[in-house]
Image: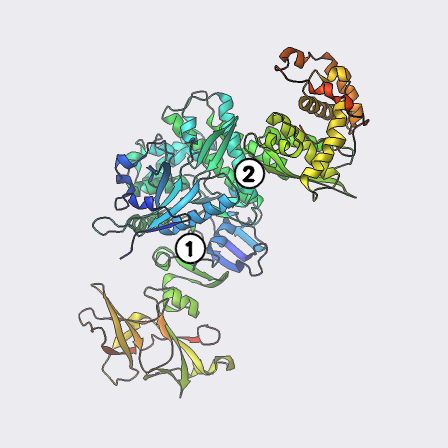
C-alpha cells in the first residue's frame, strides 16, 4: 500500500500533522484559515501552520508535480508568484480508499484574490491600477516564455506594495514554459485573459457584488490595450539618429509611468543608427535611494534617486563603460556630470532647491526642450534655459522649509571647490 | 463543420535538431472523432497546438476545410478548445455560464438564448438553465463546460487531455459523455491523450505518434488487429501484446520449446539486416492452454495470477529460451486463461498461439511483415 509522501523543497515536518486522511472538502474548521478564495475547478483550502498560511489544492498527482515544478521554475526566474511548498501523495482515507494528491503553496501575506478586490466598491482608478498590474505580470510572464493558458482574476493575487499594486501568479496548472512565445501564443493567452476576466466580472455583477458603474467589457479591453502598450514599450527595438536620444528618454519615462524600472540599458551605434535595448525590472520601495546612496553618497528621495540613477546608467551606456566597476563610473559621473551641472546654476538661485531635486528638474527641462527642438540640447544650454525660464520664478524652498537646528547649509560650503566649468556633455541624460 | 488536414506539417523547436512533429500527414473527415495518442513527448500535443495556432508551423501546411490556416491567428480559426476553462461562475445561471462568451462577442440576446437552449437540449441541461451551478452534480458541471464550446458553433473541437485532472470516477463518466455528445453533434473533433484505453473507447480513428512521427492511423479495430509496427503493437491494447525476437530455423521461429512456422512469403521478405531473426507478437488472449508436447506449445512458468472475475491473467516467464519475451512495460509474458481453471504460482503451463493470431515484424525495422 502507498505511504503518505511529502515531496518538498524544504523539509517541513509540521505538514504531517494535517488531516491528510480526510478529503480536503471535509477538513475541520479548526485547521482552516478563513481567507477569501477565488473560483477554482478544484477544492482549495487555506490552513495555518507554524505561523504561516498555506494554500492546499487537491489535484491529480501528475498535474500536482507538474505545477510544483513550474512554480519553482517561475520563482527562479523571479516572476511574482506563489511559492510552492510541496506535493503530498499516497493519501488514503480511513477505509483505505485513495485520495487525490495535494499541492501545497505558501499563501502570500497581505494578498487578496483579484476577485475579492473587485467585489469591493472600487474607485475607478483603483480598477485601472489592478488591471495595469495584471498586464505587467502577464508581460513579464510572456517575456520569460511562460504561456499561462488560463489567465483569470481567480488565478491571480494582488498585493499592495507601497504605492503600487503588484499582481502575483497563483495557478500555473494550465501553463507551460517555452523558450520563447510566438505572437500567436501571446495573443491567444491575452484573448483568454480578456474572456475570463470579463466573465468573472459579469459573475460579480450577477451576484450584485460589482458596482453598477463598472463596465465589464471595458475592463477586459483595457487589459488588452495596456498589455499591448507595455509589450511594445519593452520589446520594440527603436532605431534613431544620434541626435535623437531624447526619444530614449521618452521611452524610459513611459516605462516608469507603467511601473517598470530600467534594469539594464544598452545603446549601440552602428551605420544603421543607434539602437537601444532596455531590460525592465520591478524593484522594492526604497531600492533606488539605497542604490544611489551606496554608489554616490547622495541621500535623496526614491523618485529623485531613480531619476539620477537613470542618468547615471545612461552615462555608463553612452561612455561605453558597462564592463567597468560600477562605483568607479558613479564617481566619475558625480565629478564630471552631476556636480558641474549643479555648479552651473548661479549660487544665489541654487539654494532654492535641494541639489537632487535641482538636477531632477534640469533633466526634466532638458527632455522638454529637446523634444520641442527635435534635437538633443546640450547641458550648458539646458541649464541656462532652466535657470531663466523656471528656477528664477520659483519660491525659495529652503527659505520656506528652513534649516533644521544645527544644520549647515551645504551649498554655502561649496566655495572651496574650484569651478570646473561646464559639465561633461558626452552623453545624453536618459532619465525622467 | 469541416475536415482537417495536416500536410507535411512540421514543428522544430528552436535550438533542437529533431523535429517535435515531423512531416505529419493526416486527413480528418468532417464530423470525425480523431484521437492523437502516444507516450509523453511523442508530438501529439504539439500537433494539436499547431492546429490551434499556438505553435508555429516550420514546414508544410494545415487546412481546416479548404482554408489554409497555417498563418491564421488562433482566434480566427473557428475552433474551440473544449474544457479550457471549466471553472463555473457561481452567481451566474447555467444559461449565462454557457453563453457569456457570446455576450462578450456582442451577439444579440435572442440569438444567445437560442443557441444556449439548443446546446442545453443536447446536453440534457434544459431544466437547469435558470439555476445556479451549485445545484448541479459533478457530471452536469462538466456538461456546462462543454456547453461553453458548443454554443460557439465552431468548425472543430480541440481537446487536450481534458480528463487528466478529473478524479477517476468522473473521468470514466465524462469520457462516455464526450464520446456520445460528439456523435450527436457531429462536429469534427481532435482529441489528445496519452491513455490508449481512452483512445480505443472514444475515437472513430486513432493516430499513434512516437518521436514526432506518425506511426499509424486507423480505426480502433485496425490498430488492435493489424498494428503496422512493433511500437503500435506494444502500445495499443491492455494488457499489452507479448513481443519477442527469435531465431528462425527451418522456416519457423524458435520460441522456447515451440517452433512457430512462418509463411514462405514472409521469410522471403526478410533482409540481411534481419540476421535470420524475426519479432513475433501475440496478445494475451491469443494463446490456448494446451497439453504438454502439443504442437507449437511452449512453457510459461507462473509468477502471478491476476483474477478479474470475468477474466484471469497469468504473468510468467518463458521457459527453455534465452530470448526476451515480454508484454509492454512489464518484463513478463501475459496469458489470458479461463478464470475457472487457474494455475498456482510456480506451476508451469503449456500454451500455443492460436492459428493466425501471431503478428510478425521485421527484427531490423520493426515493421509488420504479415
In the image, B352 versus A3, the foreground residue is A3
Are there few (<14), some (14-19), or many (20+) residues within 10 Å of tag 2? Answer: many
The vertical placement of A336 against B167, above or below, is above
What residue is disc 1 on?
B34
The vertical placement of A129 against B355, above or below, is above
In the image, A147 versus A113, the foreground residue is A113
Look at the numbered disc 2 and give the secondary structure of its residue: helix
Look at the numbered disc 1 and give the secondary structure of its residue: strand
The reply to whether label 2 and label 1 mark residues of one chain is no
**Whole-Å distance between the Cαs marked 2 and 1?**
35 Å
Q: Which mark is residue A139?
A: 2
Horizontal arrangement in the rendering, residue A318 relative to residue B111 (left or right): right
Name the image quarter holding the N terminus of chain A.
bottom left
Horizontal arrangement in the rendering, residue A410 relative to residue A373 (left or right): left
The answer to whether any part of residue B241 appears in the image is: yes
| Foreground tag (2 vs 1) | 2
Q: Which chain carries label 1?
A: B
Q: Which residue is drawn at 74% across and 13% down?
A: A392
The answer to whether any part of residue B64 appears in the image is: no
- Whole-percent x, y for residue A291 in the image: 61, 33
Count of all numbered marks drawn on residues in the image: 2
Are there few (<14), some (14-19), or many (20+) residues within 10 Å of tag 1? Answer: many
Q: In which quarter of the image is residue A424?
A: top right
Q: Quadrant of residue A204?
A: top left
Horizontal arrangement in the rendering, residue A382 relative to residue B303 (left or right): right
- Whole-percent x, y for residue A299 in the image: 63, 27
Farthest right residue in view: A421
Q: Quadrant of residue B320?
A: bottom left
Amino acid at each position: 500500500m502507498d505511504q503518505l509522501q511529502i515531496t518538498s523543497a524544504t523539509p517541513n515536518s509540521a505538514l504531517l500533522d494535517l488531516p491528510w486522511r480526510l478529503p480536503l472538502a471535509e477538513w475541520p474548521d479548526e485547521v482552516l484559515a478563513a481567507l477569501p478564495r477565488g473560483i477554482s475547478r478544484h477544492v482549495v483550502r487555506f490552513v495555518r501552520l507554524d505561523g504561516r498560511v498555506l494554500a492546499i489544492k487537491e489535484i491529480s498527482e501528475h498535474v500536482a508535480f507538474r505545477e510544483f515544478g513550474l512554480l519553482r521554475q517561475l520563482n527562479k526566474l523571479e516572476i511574482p508568484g506563489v511559492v510552492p511548498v510541496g506535493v503530498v501523495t499516497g493519501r488514503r482515507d480511513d477505509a483505505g480508499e485513495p485520495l487525490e494528491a495535494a499541492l501545497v503553496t505558501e499563501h502570500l501575506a497581505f494578498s487578496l484574490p483579484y476577485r475579492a478586490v473587485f467585489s469591493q466598491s472600487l474607485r475607478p482608478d483603483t480598477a485601472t491600477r489592478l488591471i495595469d498590474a495584471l498586464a505587467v505580470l502577464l508581460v513579464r510572464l510572456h517575456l520569460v516564455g511562460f504561456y499561462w493558458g488560463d489567465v483569470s482574476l481567480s488565478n491571480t493575487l494582488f498585493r499592495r506594495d507601497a504605492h503600487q499594486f503588484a499582481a502575483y501568479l497563483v495557478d500555473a496548472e494550465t501553463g507551460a514554459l517555452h523558450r520563447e512565445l510566438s505572437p500567436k501564443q501571446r495573443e491567444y493567452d491575452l484573448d483568454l485573459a480578456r474572456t475570463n476576466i470579463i466573465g468573472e466580472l459579469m459573475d460579480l455583477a450577477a451576484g450584485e457584488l460589482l458596482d453598477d458603474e463598472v463596465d465589464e467589457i471595458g475592463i477586459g479591453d483595457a487589459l488588452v490595450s495596456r498589455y499591448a502598450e507595455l509589450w511594445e514599450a519593452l520589446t520594440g527595438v527603436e532605431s534613431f539618429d544620434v541626435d535623437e536620444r531624447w526619444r530614449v528618454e521618452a521611452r524610459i519615462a513611459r516605462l516608469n509611468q507603467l511601473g517598470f524600472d530600467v534594469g539594464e540599458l544598452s545603446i549601440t551605434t552602428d551605420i544603421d543608427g543607434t539602437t537601444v535595448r532596455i531590460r525592465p525590472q520591478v524593484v522594492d520601495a526604497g531600492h533606488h535611494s539605497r542604490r544611489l546612496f551606496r554608489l554616490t553618497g547622495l541621500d535623496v528621495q526614491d523618485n529623485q534617486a531613480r531619476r539620477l540613477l537613470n542618468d547615471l546608467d545612461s552615462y555608463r551606456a553612452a561612455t561605453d563603460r558597462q564592463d567597468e566597476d560600477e562605483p568607479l563610473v558613479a564617481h566619475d559621473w558625480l565629478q564630471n556630470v552631476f556636480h558641474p551641472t549643479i555648479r552651473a546654476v548661479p549660487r544665489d538661485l541654487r539654494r532654492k532647491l535641494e541639489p537632487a531635486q535641482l538636477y531632477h528638474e534640469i533633466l526634466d527641462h532638458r527632455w522638454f526642450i529637446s523634444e520641442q527642438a527635435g534635437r538633443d540640447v546640450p547641458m550648458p544650454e539646458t541649464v541656462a534655459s532652466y535657470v531663466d525660464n523656471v528656477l528664477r520664478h520659483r519660491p525659495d524652498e529652503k527659505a520656506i522649509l528652513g534649516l533644521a537646528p544645527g544644520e549647515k547649509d551645504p551649498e554655502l560650503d561649496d566655495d572651496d571647490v574650484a569651478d570646473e566649468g561646464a559639465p561633461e556633455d558626452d552623453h545624453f541624460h536618459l532619465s525622467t | 463543420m469541416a475536415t482537417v488536414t495536416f500536410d507535411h506539417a512540421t514543428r522544430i523547436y528552436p535550438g533542437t535538431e529533431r523535429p517535435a512533429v515531423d512531416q505529419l500527414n493526416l486527413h480528418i473527415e468532417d464530423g470525425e472523432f480523431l484521437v492523437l495518442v502516444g507516450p509523453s513527448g511523442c508530438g501529439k500535443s504539439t500537433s494539436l497546438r499547431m492546429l490551434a495556432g499556438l505553435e508555429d508551423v516550420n514546414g508544410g501546411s494545415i487546412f481546416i476545410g479548404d482554408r489554409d490556416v497555417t498563418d491564421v491567428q488562433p482566434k480566427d480559426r473557428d475552433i474551440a478548445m473544449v474544457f479550457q476553462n471549466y471553472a463555473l461562475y457561481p452567481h451566474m445561471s447555467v444559461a449565462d455560464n454557457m453563453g457569456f462568451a457570446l455576450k462578450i462577442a456582442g451577439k444579440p440576446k435572442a440569438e444567445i438564448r437560442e443557441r444556449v437552449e439548443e446546446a442545453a437540449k443536447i446536453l440534457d441541461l434544459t431544466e437547469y438553465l435558470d439555476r445556479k451551478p451549485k445545484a448541479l452534480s459533478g457530471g452536469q458541471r462538466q456538461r456546462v463546460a462543454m456547453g461553453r464550446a458548443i454554443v460557439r458553433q465552431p468548425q472543430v473541437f480541440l481537446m487536450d487531455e481534458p480528463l487528466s485532472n478529473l478524479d477517476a470516477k468522473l473521468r470514466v463518466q465524462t469520457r462516455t459523455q464526450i464520446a456520445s455528445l460528439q456523435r450527436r453533434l457531429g462536429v469534427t473533433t481532435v482529441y489528445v491523450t496519452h491513455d490508449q484505453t481512452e483512445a480505443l473507447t472514444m475515437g472513430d480513428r486513432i493516430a499513434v505518434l512516437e518521436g514526432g512521427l506518425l506511426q499509424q492511423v486507423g480505426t480502433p479495430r485496425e490498430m488492435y488487429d493489424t498494428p503496422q509496427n512493433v511500437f503500435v503493437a506494444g502500445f495499443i491494447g491492455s494488457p499489452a501484446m507479448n513481443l519477442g525476437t527469435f531465431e528462425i530455423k527451418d522456416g519457423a521461429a524458435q520460441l522456447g520449446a515451440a517452433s512457430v512456422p512462418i509463411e514462405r512469403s514472409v521469410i522471403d521478405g526478410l533482409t540481411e539486416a534481419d540476421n535470420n531473426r524475426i519479432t513475433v507478437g501475440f496478445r494475451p488472449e491469443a494463446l490456448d492452454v494446451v497439453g504438454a508436447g502439443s504442437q507449437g506449445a511452449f512453457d510459461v512458468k507462473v509468477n502471478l495470477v491476476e483474477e478479474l472475475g470475468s477474466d484471469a491473467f497469468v504473468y510468467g516467464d518463458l521457459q527453455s529460451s534465452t530470448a526476451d519475451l515480454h508484454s509492454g512495460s512489464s518484463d513478463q509474458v501475459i496469458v489470458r486463461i479461463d478464470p475457472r481453471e487457474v494455475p498456482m504460482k510456480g506451476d508451469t503451463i503449456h500454451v500455443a498461439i492460436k492459428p493466425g493470431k501471431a503478428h510478425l515484424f521485421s527484427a531490423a525495422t520493426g515493421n509488420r511483415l504479415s
